[in-house]
Image (cartoon, grey):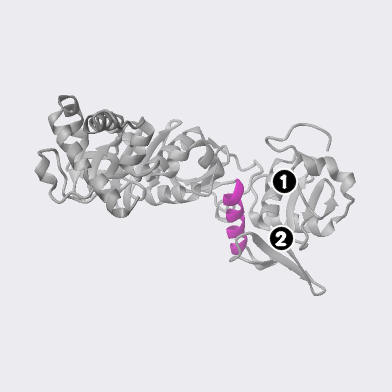
Amino acid sequence: MTEQVRAEERAQLTSFLGYVKRSKGAQEMLPSLRVLSRGIFVDERAVSALIEHYQVWLEQESHGEVHKSPEKSFQWLFEGKDPPKHYLVEGKTVLVGFVVPVLITNPQQFGLPYYLGSLLSAENYLHPADPSLCKISKLEMRQGKGGLECHISTRGSTLVVHEKVVRDFSALIRDSRFVERRYPEALRTLAGGLKLLVSLIRRARRIPRTFPIVVPYDVRSSKTKNVRMAGKFMFIEERGLLLRTIELSGRNLSGFLRAELLRAPRDKLGSFKLTPKHRDLMGFYEAFGKRRSVHARAFAEFEEGVRRTRDSRERFQGFFTAAECFEKFSQWYQLSQPIDFHKIKSSVERFGVQGERYQLYGGWIFAFDRSQTLVRCVGRHIRMPGHRRGAA
């Protein structure tokens, strides 16, 4: 389809606006609709009604020759399966919805509700009067000195979350496979991210300092900062204020560990050299003219494993930092010895590990690829979530 033909077909949507005005059945939709210079805005709650009226109009215009399914009608009207969401603000009235793109030179000409202002992108703007947020029980949006504040009532107390923390959380979950799989709506708008954040906070439980879990260095050394956990999401709070959210899983865990090691004292890393600009490799050891790199995933797997170990000789006695974890990782890695594959075959297959060669220390398996990069690290004596019981 040429651009000219496409533009002509889109221009026909102005005739649809005339139908909306004439049709008595479409009158109930008018409070949810605005004519813009760039198209037709419709509140998300009225999208189904808009599509139904569009289908009726299309059949009438084509004398019954053209019919589009609701799915195809949606994609045609909004030019895609997942159109961007916007806020339309008129005084105290706030609508959240989508735009049917079509050039309209004079939005007032149709005698329909029109809007001459600018829309706000819901992807990067959070409006306190968002209808979906107003529905959330015991969530209060306030304008504070530093900007928008979210006051969340949970477990008999109130936690305050500043807008920056909401934005940081929304950026964090873009790299979360868990959120992408289970809560894709949270990735589309800031309000969606906030709704997920509220849900996680209300599920989160306070973690005592005696519980072995990796925490930021400033939390380990603080007497006023506390930790809550919901699944693999960690919340750092201080005196009723949420400071930060961390996901202890996947790429987000690797990124957190790398960032913490960059702040660690040089002596905690020994001979290890960090490569902060590399996306996957965390750093390398160099000895006798040979360099052996360590993949970020290998250290992240070690941290997850040592966090779950029940061996008192291996586990930490309470909160620990990434630097403390790395000291243990580095020591055991450097003490490990080559091992024949057939002796650890069942463990390697259970964890889905693939390598060219392997080394072993205690119950810890270190796997290397062809370039001699340490790519995986698993504890064959530790059962991770999703792994079945069985011989290691």
Point out the frontmost of discs 2 and 1.
2
Q: Report crowding for label 2: few under 14, some 14 to 19, many 20 or more residues within 10 A (C-alpha).
A: many
Judge whether residue 250 is colored magenta: yes
Is 222 displayed left or right of 3 in the figure? Answer: right
The quadrant where residue 334 appears: bottom right
Which residue is labeled 1 in the image?
306
Q: Is residue 273 or residue 114 the one in the foreground?
A: 114
Q: Residue furthest bottom?
A: 289
Q: Is residue 199 or residue 36 the one in the foreground?
A: 36
Q: Residue at x 10, y 44 (%)?
A: 108
Amino acid type for the residue under numbered disc 1: Val
Q: Dominant secondary structure of the magenta stretch?
A: helix
Q: Position of residue 19 (x, y in %)?
A: 17, 33
Q: Residue at x 63, y 59 (%)?
A: 280
Tell me how far mark 2 sits from mark 1, CA to CA: 18 Å
Point out the stretch of residues depicted in magenta.
249-263
Q: Residue at x 69, y 48 (%)?
A: 301
Which residue is labeled 2 in the image?
294
Residue 272 can be seen, yes or no: no
Work out whether mark 2 precedes mark 1 in sequence or the reverse, and give the earlier one.
2
Q: Which quarter of the image is occupied by the C terminus?
A: top right
Amino acid type for the residue under numbered disc 2: Val
Decide: is 110 above or below 49: below
Q: Is residue 226 or residue 38 the one in the foreground?
A: 38
Q: Position of residue 179 (x, y in %)?
A: 51, 41
Q: Report crowding for label 1: few under 14, some 14 to 19, many 20 or more residues within 10 A (C-alpha).
A: many
- Which label was assigned to residue 186? none
Mark 1 lies on a secondary structure that is helix
Q: Position of residue 133 (x, y in %)?
A: 33, 36
Residue 218 can be seen, yes or no: yes
